[in-house]
Image (spheres, rainbow, N blue to C red):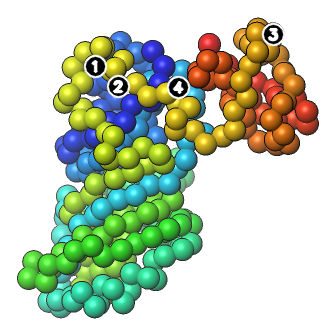
Amino acid sequence: MFGFLNIYKPPGMTSHDVIGVLRRITGVRQIGHTGTLDPFAVGVLPLAVGKAARLIEYLDDDKAYIGRFNFGRTTATYDLEGEITEIFDRKVTREDISDVLKSFEGGIEQIPPIYSAIKSGGKKLYEYAREGIEVEIKPRKVYIEKIELIDFNYDNQYADIYIECSRGTYIRSIAYDLGKLTGAGGYLSKLERVSAGRFILADSVKLGDIKSVTDVEERLLNPLDYLSQPCQELDDIEYERVQHGMPVCSRIGVISGIVLLTRCNKIIAVSEHNGSVLSPKKVMI
């Protein structure tokens, strides 16, 4: 079994829980995901099945989300599941939000939530938080391609915001920082990932609709449709060489970087361009 799955993650499950369901259905242990979603979040969760898991690092890693940002309080986790840490009387307006959103666009330094899986000193940050230990959290550089207010409810003090961002961006931190900038406090109450690289919401499959191996096989996606690297189709001799990890001559004019070696619309190997030859790094068969 080899390919990608575009799963719509339901609420209440971790990304690893979803993998566990697919492992039980397929009997395949080698299944990976392209980026964790918090348990309360929903949306696009691309999975790689079988040896396709070795291709995850070559996927585009940009993401897009729609988040609901509530104002009037902050929480320890920066989302609805955390203990309330502060309550604010101030009410925000649409103009308040619009005035500060632009400050998030482009390259920014973001401080991740203490309740996150980022490691510091060999331990995950949330482990320090649960033990009540203070730890310095270093800011991380992320990139926000687009951030846009799509709906605002003044009476209930929440905003729905669309965000296109780089991998590693914490939407929870944006909620907290937005609340800080508006002076009203903020936290994330809903989150839906609407795209991850070339995987989009409209093409996703609900986890509950997959009940058998056949259901998985029918929904497996060809990795070639989701990878952006250049390809070289192998002839008979090259195909034999690549199966044994031997290099082949380049015929595509690329002088550096990753090239996918293919045969009959299937990935045979991932290669690296070294001068005039393509040297296999990962053989998929």
Q: Are marks 2 and 1 in contact (CB under 8 Å)?
A: yes
Q: Which amino acid does label 2 sit on?
A: Arg
Disc sitting over residue 237 in the figure:
3
Helix, strand or loop at mark 3: helix
Q: Nearer the viewer, mark 3 or mark 1?
A: 3
Q: Earlier in the sequence, mark 4 or mark 1?
A: 4
List the single residue furthest toward the left: 155
Q: Earlier in the sequence, mark 4 or mark 2?
A: 4
Q: Which amino acid does label 4 sit on?
A: Ala
Q: Name the residue under label 1.
A: 215
Q: What residue is shown at x 24% (from left), y 87% (from top)?
A: 94
Instruction: Tell me if 284 is positioned left or right of 81 in this view.
Output: right
Q: Give coordinates of residue 160: x percent, y percent.
A: 24, 70
Q: Mark 2 points at which residue?
A: 219
* Residue 237 makes an appearance in the image: yes
Q: Which of marks 3 and 1 is nearer the N terminus?
A: 1
